[in-house]
Amino acid sequence: MPRFHLVIFACFLFTLSEAQDVTYTKSMIDSLCAPGYHGRGYVFQGDIKAAAFIQRQCKAKGLKPIGDSYVQTFELGVNTFPGEMSVNINGKPLRTGIDFQVNPGSQRINGSFKPYYLKPNTVKTPKKLLKTASKKKLRERIIVIDKTSEDAILDEFVKNISQNPLNAKGYVLLTENKLIWWVSRRTYNTTILDVVKDHFDKKIKTIDLAIDQEWVSNYRSQNVIAYIPGQIDSTVVFSAHFDHLGRMGMDTYIAGASDNASGSAMLLDLAEYYLAHPPKYTTVFIWFAGEEAGLVGSKYYVEHPDLPLEKIKFLLNLDLMADAKKGITVVNGTIFNDAFDRLKAINESEDLLNQVKARGAAANSDHYPFYEKGVPSFFIYTEGDYKHYHDINDVPENIPMTNYAQVFKLITSFVDAGF
């Protein structure tokens, strides 16, 4: 075969291998976002089922467990919404996650209620607030607060709304903002709903609610841990959280394709790479649960490490890997300057990403408990045009996976160069 054709063929094979990596990663994202895993949260043991899926992948690849098991179990308290989730305003049913969302700390509630529109002057001072709270009729009402009015008095009142200052049945907060959900590890003594203002009739006359809720005080979740033996005893750790927000009622779950099925799938892809390219360092992969509940799994791990933390040369925590159109941001990049400079130099020499941006320390993902223990660590996330985050539209069919192969190449080149 002529040399020119050999070059073209080699380029084709390289491009094909990159495409296969993305295809494999997307297939893993699809699996982790499947309805049977219920958003990888705390309803119907979605996180446990997803952990079992990851374990099966590790075992099938030949990754080794540390000890007799791939899992590390821990407990947490969490508020859940496993059953009915019905909101009707003026007889019109609202769509979960589109027209409304329940505040994750809310209590269960069932019934038909009249609204009470809260005016700023009724809570302007502590004396007026007390007078308003003393009205007996409020105890059977849903308080409606129009946050779109941008009133400073009401904004200040809303900050303490979880304490139920008016002793009401519940609260409806009218908003123009995007609905972003989260996980709560505590409960309030009331129910709070965020409702998109322009999705219903202008004036609320009736509010019908049927919201099931269950507090679970000792929910048992799991981290998944596997490794590839290295040529030396020192360790490199790749981590990602696999949990997400779970179900907001029986009929709606938050899939979390970008956050963080994408990072979890990349760890499986990295495992395949290092199985094919035996690493210098013992290479550990940790899929954390409980990240969305406050870094619970990673905090537990650093207090109960399977391997000595002092042997970790570097930890790379990967989250939000779905769109690197603009590049990546590296948390702790301004802390571990030499490592960041080396990462940036690799990116420039290999012409991979438009931007590799440094950021300071932040307790915003599972790298942070390790960083607090003195482990050199980066938290890497991608930046692009993808905007779905903690909402019902963060699904596999929406994520572009832009520049996935370039991010993968940058990470492996950085680790393979050594520390």
Image: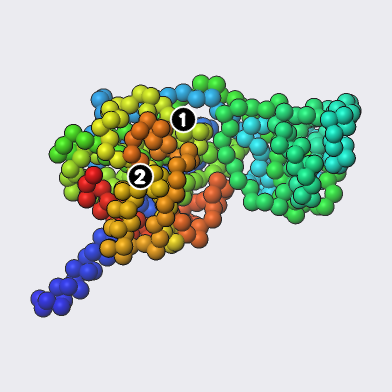
Q: Can you give x and y, in whole percent of width and height, for residue 93 in the image? A: 73, 46
Specify the amino acid type for callout 1.
Answer: Val
Residue 248 placement, left or right of 172: left
Outermost residue on the left side: it is: 1
* Chain-order first, disc 1 or disc 2: 1
- For label 1, the crowd category at 10 Å Cα-Cα, with few meaning under 14, some 14 to 19 and many 20 or more, is many
Q: Nearer the viewer, residue 38 or 194?
A: 194
Q: Are marks 1 and 2 in contact (CB under 8 Å)?
A: no
Which-is-in-front pick, marks 1 and 2? Answer: 2
- Residue 47: which quarter of the image? top left
Q: Can you give x and y, in whole percent of width and height, for residue 383 in the image? A: 46, 56
- Residue 12: which quarter of the image? bottom left
Q: Can you give x and y, in whole percent of width and height, for residue 336 in the image? A: 35, 44
Residue at image location 45% in from the left, 45% down from the top: 360
Q: Secondary structure at mark 2?
A: loop
- For label 2, the crowd category at 10 Å Cα-Cα, with few meaning under 14, some 14 to 19 and many 20 or more, is some
Q: Circle 2 is placed at which residue position? A: 336
Q: Nearer the viewer, residue 224 or 238?
A: 238
Residue 139, labelled with which disc?
none
- Residue 275: which quarter of the image? top left
Asked whether residue 50 appears in the rendered view, the answer is no
The vertical placement of 231 against 140, above or below, is: below
Q: Circle 1 is placed at which residue position? A: 296
Q: Secondary structure at mark 1?
A: helix
Q: Nearer the viewer, residue 417 or 35?
A: 417
Q: CA distance from mark 1 to mark 2?
A: 25 Å
Residue at image location 43% in from the left, 29% down from the top: 299
Residue at image location 54% in from the left, 55% down from the top: 387
Residue at image location 38% in from the left, 24% down from the top: 303
